[in-house]
Image (spheres, rainbow, N blue to C red):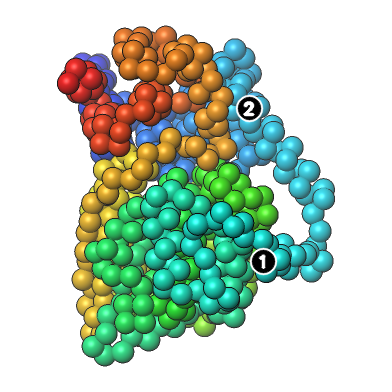
């Protein structure tokens, strides 16, 4: 009995440490600590629920679902994981159970309504859908030549049908100053890209001549200013300086339109200068949830939403460099014996399925132990070093490069040096504090040289502006009604009245820190001042903010 009491006490102490790690955004460390607490006292539902929440922060929705089923709050956490994965029907069932248990919970009510709305939309789309063979592509209905460019437009222009380096540089400069590209030229770039991609196989072979180099980048996730930093560090793409961007160009970040148009324009300018692979976020389901669809609708138009979805279905699934390095966004397969010819034969011109080779290429992750296991994301699988070794041997390859996971240093070398994860979005989601990285291969030996870099300061855009699940307009009105007008006094008022404002924001699904950032932005402070405050927010240091306000 004394031993049991000691375990309970020790578990509580570890939980406190785990909570502190969670607050510091060290979600992997928090998961390890919650696991230790569970091993000491598996009957405490809070530990299971907290670990599930930490898994969702790392997008490990499969693991979150396993933990959630064992917790008192299991239905809620599992429903949130399903919701984040776009599995609205499954989420609806869980939130219906939550409502039965907690009928007056405002957050559960909100998420239940959200699921009901999403399921109704799915049913409507299914009712009006047509067979693939009868489907008309929006790309076939667009004639960009007929779109007039207004005389007052002063942005980048494509002369004729050829995308030039001068155009790309001008467009990138405009994007850096948050100026828009005219829709005529945006249509032209995306349509040319579609025609180019449709002719490529699902697995593309890349030849790097002896004495030349080749750069592989991982996820960018709409972080345009970090993309520009990569080019400043490593040079613009060209025939002499080629790149492969390994999927997940969009979502999460607030500049996904700028990122994708830049990458597409570079490909149109010189097809051999840049290669693009599909990631799991180049899909309708992810774009609906994680911001790209809303951003496209806001910056361009509804027609572009459909057009990008069509083009994403044309992206290749994998690349092989000099018959030695296999590059794919996610990972390997649930069965042995998959050959490169099998990947080339995949009919990729569709939305990603929930199982099979295409799904696993986009979604799978490595694991530190042998064999195969369930995916922590709930899609694809986890695979060990033995699976990696067998695939390389079967296909006479030396190395696998993949992306798909944020890493503290921007990269991780695993599976006895035979697998490298590369991630190129530093300070992911403006909160993870990670570095970004890219790999530079030199032919003929193709020894990987990994370069890491830190995030750059970008122009401030309110978090989740384009995320359909967190519409900012609604809560901006709520905060404005409490703190109108926006001014430095409002900032003092916000800091002084955290508790009531946190209650106000709770049902809106947003944090006090996000409210504070928006008040700061509304006060008209400059970028350096905002960066200082965001740094204090990341440290959880409101004393630091007070000192900043006093200066």
290 left or right of 141? left
Residue at figure coordinates x 69%, y 33% from the top left: 117
Q: In the rendered view, tell whether residue 88 sits above or below residue 421.
A: above
> Cα distance, mark 2 to mark 1?
42 Å
Residue for badge 2: 112
Could you tell which of marks 2 and 1 lies nearer the N-terminus?
2
Q: Secondary structure at mark 1?
A: helix
Residues 346 and 131: in front is 131
Question: Residue 123 appears at what percent x and percent y?
Answer: 76, 43
Residue farthest front in this picture: 151
For the image shown, how many numbered marks are present on the structure? 2
Question: Residue 106 appears at what percent x and percent y?
Answer: 57, 17
Residue at figure coordinates x 36%, y 77% from the top left: 238
Residues 112 and 231: in front is 231
Question: In the rendered image, is residue 308 in sight?
Answer: no
Residues 218 and 9: in front is 218
Residue at figure coordinates x 55%, y 55% from the top left: 153
Q: Secondary structure at mark 2?
A: helix
Q: Which mark is residue 467?
A: none
Q: In the rendered view, tell whether residue 26 sits above or below residue 99.
A: below
Q: In the rendered view, tell whether residue 202 sits above or below residue 156.
A: below
Is label 2 in contact with label 1 (beta carbons under 8 Å)? no
Neighbor class of circle 1 (other Cα within 10 Å; few <14, some 14-19, many 20+) is some
Question: Residue 378 appears at what percent x and percent y?
Answer: 50, 48
Question: In the rendered image, is residue 530 in sight?
Answer: yes
Residue for badge 1: 144
Q: In the rendered view, tell whether residue 42 sits above or below residue 175.
A: above
Residue at figure coordinates x 46%, y 55% from the top left: 258
78 left or right of 184? left
If the image is split into quadrants, where does the C terminus sit? top left
Q: Nearer the viewer, mark 2 or mark 1?
A: 1
């Amino acid at each position: 009995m004394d031993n049991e009491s000691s375990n309970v006490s020790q578990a509580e102490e570890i939980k406190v440490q785990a909570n502190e790690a969670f607050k510091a955004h060290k979600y992997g460390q928090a998961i390890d600590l919650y696991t230790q607490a569970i091993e000491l006292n598996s009957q405490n539902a809070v530990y299971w629920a907290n670990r599930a929440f930490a898994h969702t922060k790392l997008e490990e929705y499969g693991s979150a679902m396993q933990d959630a089923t064992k917790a008192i709050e299991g239905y809620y956490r599992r429903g949130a994981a399903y919701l984040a994965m776009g599995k609205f029907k499954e989420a609806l069932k869980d939130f219906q159970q939550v409502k039965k248990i907690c009928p007056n919970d405002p957050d559960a009510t909100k998420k239940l309504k959200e699921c009901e709305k999403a399921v109704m939309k799915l049913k409507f789309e299914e009712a009006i859908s047509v067979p693939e063979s009868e489907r008309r592509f929006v790309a076939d209905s667009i004639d960009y030549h007929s779109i007039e460019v207004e005389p007052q437009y002063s942005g980048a222009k494509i002369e004729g049908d050829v995308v030039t380096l001068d155009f790309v540089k001008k467009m990138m400069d405009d994007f850096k100053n948050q100026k828009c590209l005219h829709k005529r030229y945006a249509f032209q770039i995306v349509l040319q890209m579609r025609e180019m991609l449709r002719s490529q196989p699902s697995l593309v072979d890349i030849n790097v001549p002896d004495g030349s180099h080749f750069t592989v980048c991982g996820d960018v996730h709409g972080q345009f200013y970090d993309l520009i930093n990569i080019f400043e560090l490593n040079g613009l793409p060209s025939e002499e300086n080629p790149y492969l961007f390994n999927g997940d160009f969009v979502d999460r970040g607030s500049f996904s339109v700028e990122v994708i148009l830049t990458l597409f324009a570079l490909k149109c300018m010189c097809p051999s200068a840049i290669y693009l692979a599909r990631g799991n976020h180049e899909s309708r389901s992810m774009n609906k949830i994680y911001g790209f669809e809303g951003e496209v609708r806001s910056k361009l138009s509804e027609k572009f939403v459909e057009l990008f979805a069509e083009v994403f279905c044309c992206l290749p699934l994998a690349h092989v460099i000099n018959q030695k390095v296999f590059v794919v966004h996610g990972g390997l397969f649930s069965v042995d014996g998959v050959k490169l010819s099998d990947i080339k034969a995949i009919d990729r011109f569709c939305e990603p399925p929930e199982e099979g080779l295409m799904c696993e290429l986009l979604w799978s992750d490595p694991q530190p132990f042998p064999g195969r296991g369930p995916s922590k994301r709930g899609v694809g699988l986890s695979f060990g070093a033995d699976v990696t070794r067998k695939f390389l041997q079967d296909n006479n390859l030396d190395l696998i490069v993949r992306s798909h996971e944020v890493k503290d240093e921007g990269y991780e070398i695993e599976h006895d040096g035979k697998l490298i994860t590369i991630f190129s979005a530093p300070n992911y989601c403006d909160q993870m504090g990670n570095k970004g990285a890219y790999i530079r291969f030199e032919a003929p030996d193709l020894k990987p040289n990994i370069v890491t870099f830190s995030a750059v300061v970008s122009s401030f855009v309110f978090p989740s502006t384009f995320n359909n699940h967190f519409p900012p307009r609604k809560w901006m009105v709520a905060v404005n009604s409490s703190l109108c007008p926006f001014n430095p006094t409002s900032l003092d008022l916000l800091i002084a009245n955290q508790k009531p404002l946190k209650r106000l924001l709770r049902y809106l699904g947003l944090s006090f820190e996000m409210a504070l950032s928006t008040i700061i932005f509304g006060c008209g402070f400059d970028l350096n001042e905002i960066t200082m405050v965001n740094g204090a927010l990341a440290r959880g240091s409101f004393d630091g903010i007070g000192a900043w306000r006093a200066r």
